[in-house]
Amino acid sequence: MSELIFFKPFFKQVLWGGHRMRDVYDYPIPGDDTGEAWVISANSHGASTVLGGTYDGQSLASLWEDHRELFGGMEGKEFPLLVKIIDANDHLSIQVHPDDEYAFAHENGTQGKTECWYILDCDEDADIIIGHHAKSREELNQMISQGRWDDLLGKFPIQKGDFFYIPAGTVHAIRKGTLLLEVQQNSDTTYRLYDYDRLENGKPRQLHLKESMEVITCPHQFMNTMGEVEDHGDYVTCTLVNGPFFSVSKWNVRTHVSISQDYPFMLIDVTAGSGMLDAWPVKAGAHLLVPSDFGMLNCQGEMELIVTHV
Ligand code: ZN
C-alpha cells in the first residue's frame, strides 16, 4: 500500500539567522541563528531524512536512487526540486542565480536555479528586493560600478501570504524580518552581487560581479504568475505559478477536499492550521511527498497547504 512520506528538516545556522522557526513551527532548531531549514531536500549540501513509515531514517536522495517507482519512474540523475524555510533576522546579500544553460557550461554541468517565495510571516515594515531599474546592460554595469544600489534595485513592501516568482537571472534578496517558504530547482549556485559592505570575521564576503553581470536579465521582466482565487466553499484554491520547472498552488482547506495525485510525485507543505491527510494527522510545519501511485488524497480540517509538482 502506498503511503505518505514525511521528512525531517536539515537545519543551517548562519549569521543572518534567527529563532522564528521554533516560535512558529516548534522545530528543534540547533541555535538562535538558524536561517534555513531544508525541509524537502535531496541535495548533498543538506539532506532531509524520512520521518517514520517504511523508509524511516533514509535520505530523500537514497529514495530517489533506489525507489524510482515512488516518483513514477521519472528520469534524471538528481531529484529535481528543493524546498526550504528561510528565517531572515538580517538582510541576505543581493544575489542572482544562473539558468540551466549557464550553470551547465560554467558550474560543472549542474542545473540552474529558478525559485519562488511564499511569505509565511514578516515584520510590519518588511520589504523584499526583486529586479532592477536599469534599461540597458550599459546602464546596469554603470550603476553597479558606481554602487548606486538604491537607484538600481527594485524594493517592494511585503505581507504575509504574498508570493513571488524569481526566474533564473532575476536580481533578488530576502530582507530582515521575513519568514518564507522557498520552492526551487535543486541547485546551490548563487552569485553574490552586493553584501551591504558587511564584514564576516573581519573580511567582506566574496562577490561574483563578473558572473552576476553575465546572467542578470536586462531589462528586468516583471512577472505576475498568480491565477484567480477559486472559492469552492469547503476549500479555496489558487495557482501561484505554473512554470517550466515546477507548478505551485495554494489550498486553504475549510472543512475537506480531495486532491488528485496525477503527477510523478507531489510535495505538500502544511503552512498553517492542522487536520488529517488521509489517515495521517498533520499540523503547520509538516512537509511530505505524495508518491506517484497514491491516487486521491483526502484532506480534512482547517489548514493551508502549499502543493508542488514538476
Ligand atoms: Zn536566491
Image (tube, grey):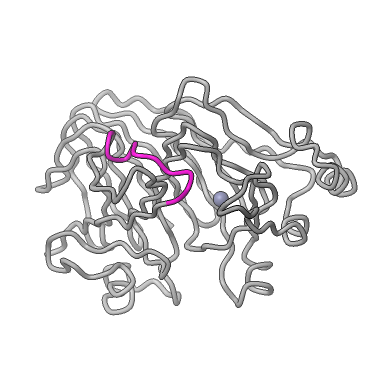
- Tell me: residue 291, above or below residue 229: below
Residue at the spot 26% in from the left edge and 75% down from the top edge = 67
Which x, y percent locates residue 219?
Answer: 79, 43
- Tell me: residue 291, above or below residue 68: above
Magenta highlight range: 14-23
Which x, y percent locates residue 137?
Answer: 86, 49
Out of 240 and 84, give the one closest to the viewer: 84
Q: Quadrant of residue 155?
A: top right
- Tell me: residue 177, above or below residue 53: above
Q: Residue furthest top?
A: 124
Q: Is residue 1 magenta?
A: no
- Tell me: residue 275, above or below residue 106: above
Q: Quadrant of residue 134?
A: top right
Q: Is residue 202 left or right of residue 161?
A: right
Which x, y percent locates residue 159?
Answer: 48, 25
Residue at the spot 45% in from the left edge and 25% down from the top edge = 123
